[in-house]
Image: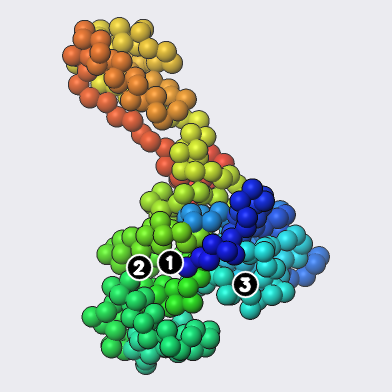
Amino acid sequence: MRDPASEPIAGTESPEESAAITLDDVWVRFGKPADPVIAARELTLRIPRGKIFCLLGPNGSGKTTAINLISGLLSPSQGQVRVFGHTPDKDRTRTLSKIAVVPQETTLYDSLDARENLFFHGHYYGVDSARLPGLVDHVIDLVQLTDRAKHRVGTYSGGMQRRLTLARALLTEPEALLLDEPTLGVDVQSRRALWDRIRELADGGMSVLLTTNYMEEAEELADYITILDHGRKVVDGTLDELRARVAEQRLLLHFDAADVADQAAASLSRASRPGGEADATVEVALNDPKEAMRVVSSLRENGSLGDRLEGFEWSEPNLQDVFLQFTGRALRD
Ligand SMILES: Nc1ncnc2c1ncn2[C@@H]1O[C@H](COP(=O)(O)OP(=O)(O)O)[C@@H](O)[C@H]1O
Ligand SMILES: [Mg+2]
């Protein structure tokens, strides 16, 4: 819960301070200086408060590196990382009082049950012991594991273990949650449950940084997306902004006769007849996805053409198209 007294005074808050987490021109180099592996290159990120910020990228693109920089496990070779005003590698204790991490590898005690795992973690992180039992019940309920709370964690499915790891992260009541590929290898039902919880947490004011290489996950959850490749930011923005940057966006209109398609093509701008004269399809190139509905409604208002429109399709560009356009490769090569 946020204490209003500790919030910056209105009007004094700069855009820098309003971000929960910032990375400025961060480089991470591993290995020999002469032949380094570069895991982050001039990486600049602004992770806002109360939103879901997604780092999307293939394996090895630097997602876990970013999480490790923010949680202070890794120091930048160059550049600056700030987490609610703290420098994570220099001040891990204060950083970890503000954030919690759900790591890529699930690290639970298999021989303990869910409650025992959470009590252990709570004591370790110094959660007030008077409040701990209530918090444990609350977070177990939140991830819908109450029925299984007394079962050994070793008997849980992968998805249940991920949910418990999320519950564990919430025990310390963080202001920001870092989720490193939270649904990797998780069954569909648990994935949906995790997505719902993550969305609810952000709606409740939590700042969420989520990494994934699942486009569907970014499309479903992210308020902001940064695409990473080889440790570098490829492109960033909201889902709509990224889609709008894909050059090829097309609306296909199917009419009931070729001559009607000719008339329609003549009446619309940026229209063509990709199937040739005998075909009754018109293709319209769009600048903006929102134009698709405008074109269809304008046709519908024009009775002579609208009545002859049998159907339309619009292939909305997805993040795969965005990735392809900016890197020249498929997201999962
Ligand atoms: N400790 C390390 N030593 C050497 N190379 C590393 C180390 N950690 C990560 N890397 C390399 O840095 C790159 C980014 O890794 P990582 O951040 O784990 O990617 P992701 O999480 O996106 O799969 C990869 O090429 C990886 O092999
Ligand atoms: Mg990783």
- Label disc, if present, on residue 95 of the rendered structure: 3
- In front: label 2 or label 1: 1
Badge 2 is on which residue?
186
**Callout 1: helix, strand or loop?**
loop
| Residue depicted at x 39% and y 80% | 135
Could you tell whether 305 is left or right of 57 in the image? left
The residue closer to the viewer here, 269 or 201, is 201
Which is more toward the observer, 281 or 227? 227
Q: Amino acid at mark 1?
A: Pro
- Is 216 placed above or below 34 here? above
Q: Amino acid at mark 3?
A: Thr
The answer for how far apart the CA atoms under marks 3 and 2 are is 29 Å
Residue 127, horizontal then vertical, whole percent = 49, 84
Question: Distance between the Cα atoms at labels 1 and 3?
Answer: 21 Å
For the residues labelled 3 and 2, say whether their Cβ atoms are less than 8 Å apart. no
What residue sits 43% from the left and 16% below the top? 270
The residue labelled by disc 1 is 182
Q: Residue at x 71, y 58 (%)?
A: 26
Image vertical order of residue 50 relative to residue 2, above or below: above
Residue nearer the viewer, 195 or 110: 195
- Who comes first in sequence, dot 1 or dot 3? 3
Gap in Å between the C-alphas at discs 2 and 1? 8 Å
* Quadrant of res 297: top left
Q: Counting other residues with Cα less than 10 Å from the Cα at mark 1, is it few (<14), some (14-19), or many (20 or more)?
A: many
Secondary element under disc 3, as helix, strand or loop, is helix
